[in-house]
Each structure stands twice: as C-alpha cells, then as structure tokens.
C-alpha cells in the first residue's frame, strides 16, 4: 500500500484563510491582533522558526514585533522583555522561542508571561486549564495535529493512539488532549519514551502513531501495522552536501519505507510544521477577540 500524504501546507492554507477573514473583521473594529516575539541567542533553527511565524502573521494581516537578545542576556533582561510585552495593549500574544540558551530559567520565564497572552499554551495556568477541560490556549503543535487529523477525515475516537515522546511541548499535551471525552479526542492513548524498552511492541498495536521523539529514524517500517496512520512531528536537520544550506530536514519517521505500509502519513517538511504556525495565529486572534470583551 502507498500511503495518502496528509498535506499540512494545504490544510494550513485553508485555516489561514479563515484566520485572515477573522483578522480583517477585527481590524474593521479597530483591533489588529499582535504577536510579541522574543528570541534569545542565534540558534539557526530558532531563527528560522521565528521568521516563519512572523511571515505568517504578516500574510494573515496581523502585527508582530520582535525583540532579540544576545545569548549572554541575563535572566532579568529576559524577564524585562516579557513584562514589557505583558503591559503592551498592542500585543495580544507572547512567544518566547524555546529552547533558551540557559534552559534552567525556561520555566521561570514561561511563568512570567501573562496567562491571557500565553499563545503557546505553556504557562502552568493554561496547562492546568487544558488538563481539566476548561477553555485555555492549547499548545500549537498538539492542537495542529488534532486539526490536521480532523480535517483529513481521520477520527481518533475509539482508536489506539501511540505517542512516542513525552515532551512538555508535544507528547504530554497530546496524550492529554487525545484522551479527552470530546470530538477531537476519546482515543485510547499509550505514551512511549526513552524509558520504554521495546517501543515497537506498542507502536505495532497502534491505529495511529505520533512520532515526537526528536530523533531521525525513531520509527521504522517494522514498527508500523499495515494501514496505520502515521503523524511525524519530528524536525531534524541532517547534513546534506547537495543543499546550499548544507542540511536537509527529516522527521522522526523513516518516510520512504513507512509510507509503503501506512494508510496515511505526514511528510517532513510540509506536514505538521505549517499547522503549528497556523495554531499560533489562531490563538493570537482568539486572544485579540477576548481582549475586546
Ligand atoms: N520551540 C519548539 N517548538 C516551539 C513552540 O511551539 N513554541 C516556542 N515558543 N518554542 C518552540
């Protein structure tokens, strides 16, 4: 079997048209949704993500403002930028690009973001609200995965979903959302991680496999049941001398082999990535709407 390709660019474009229409309506009422972006240091992957997010804002008619700090910035300097964004009425959403050069202060910086502007959905208030099913900013990659499945006609309800990876950004919130009793969830969820001795023993039982381990080649064809749906959240740079940049992007899944066995699969690039950015726009517009109430 050759898998159906779940085209994230196409689904994201459809959602971004809906978002742009919302932005136009808000602007007509005098409010331009605004995103404040903080980038600390010069990690090339982070630079590239931030540029993609800012371009997407501009294309949707939104406003974005970036503050850059050197990798040597102090905790106080970083917190000062967050506080300035918190107090700026033009900014409805705050994005502190992770990882920070000093990962030890990440939780403190996230906790300093006004939960009402936390469009990444990383603040403990929003994480807690999400877990108990209260309205909250949902983290962008997990929400993007759910929207992608929904808009591709793939229902998670009643299925066995195996997630590989337990990060705060992807694996853990996805496990939460997919196990909820609602339209996008209601799945039986298993989470595997680096402490799981035989990940394949679990993924072979899955109707849907979600790879979010951050390591190329994590999911090979022998780990996938014939006809399963495979969602690849991984974004890994591997050296490639034939590319001008010197690298190419690959996911966590061995795409050529797995796509012969799966019924549907997301590519990298062009799968989950564009959906993540789209959900950031979605959250920022939602925040702008709430600020008017
Ligand atoms: N780094 C990797 N993914 C993300 C994300 O979704 N948001 C932020 N702020 N940083 C990230």
Image: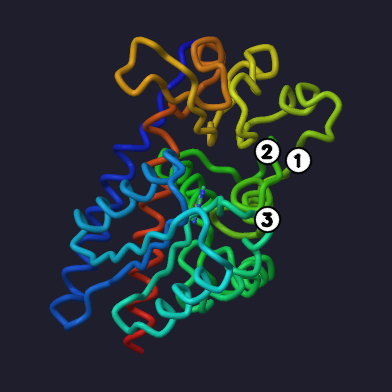
Q: Is residue 225 left or right of residue 95?
A: right
Q: Residue 167, position in %: x, y?
A: 67, 47
Mark 3 surroundings: few (<14), some (14-19) or many (≥20) residues within 10 A: some
Cβ–Cβ under 8 Å for marks 1 and 2: yes
Q: Which residue is mark 3?
A: 176
Give the distance between the C-alpha atoms of the residues marked 1 and 2, in whole angstroms. 6 Å
Q: Residue 274, position in %: x, y?
A: 37, 42
Give the distance between the C-alpha atoms of the residues marked 1 and 3, in whole angstroms. 11 Å
Tag 1 secondary structure: strand
Q: Eyeballing the image, is 78 above or below 206?
A: below
- Residue sitting at x 36%, y 64%: 67
Q: Nearer the viewer, residue 86 or 41?
A: 41
Q: Which residue is mark 2?
A: 163
Which of the labelled discs sits on residue 190, or is there none? 1
Q: Is residue 39 left or right of residue 32?
A: right
Q: Earlier in the sequence, mark 1 or mark 3?
A: 3
């Amino acid at each position: 079997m050759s898998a159906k390709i779940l085209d994230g660019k196409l689904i994201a474009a459809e959602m971004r048209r809906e978002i742009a229409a919302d932005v136009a309506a808000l602007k007509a009422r005098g409010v331009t949704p605004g995103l404040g972006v903080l980038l600390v240091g010069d990690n090339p992957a982070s630079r590239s993500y931030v540029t993609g997010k800012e371009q997407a804002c501009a294309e949707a008619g939104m406003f974005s403002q970036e503050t850059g700090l050197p990798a040597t910035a102090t905790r106080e300097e970083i917190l000062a930028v967050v506080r300035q964004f918190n107090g700026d009425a033009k900014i409805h959403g705050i994005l502190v690009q992770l990882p920070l050069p000093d990962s030890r202060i990440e939780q403190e910086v996230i906790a300093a973001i006004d939960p009402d502007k936390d469009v990444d959905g990383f603040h403990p208030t929003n994480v807690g609200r999400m877990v108990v099913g209260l309205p909250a900013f949902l983290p962008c990659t997990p929400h993007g995965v759910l929207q992608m499945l929904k808009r591709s006609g793939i229902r998670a309800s009643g299925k066995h979903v195996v997630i590989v990876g337990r990060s705060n950004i992807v694996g853990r919130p996805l496990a939460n959302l997919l196990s909820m009793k609602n339209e996008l969830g209601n799945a039986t969820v298993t989470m595997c991680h680096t402490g799981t001795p035989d990940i394949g023993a679990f993924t072979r039982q899955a109707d849907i496999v979600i790879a979010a381990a951050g390591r190329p080649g994590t999911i090979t064809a022998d780990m996938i049941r014939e006809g399963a749906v495979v969602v690849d959240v991984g974004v890994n740079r591997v050296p490639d001398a034939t590319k001008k940049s010197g690298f190419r992007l690959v996911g966590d899944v061995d795409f050529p082999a797995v796509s012969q066995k799966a019924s549907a699969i997301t590519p990298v690039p062009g799968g989950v990535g564009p959906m993540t950015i789209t959900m950031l726009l979605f959250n920022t517009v939602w925040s702008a709407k709430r600020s008017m109430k």
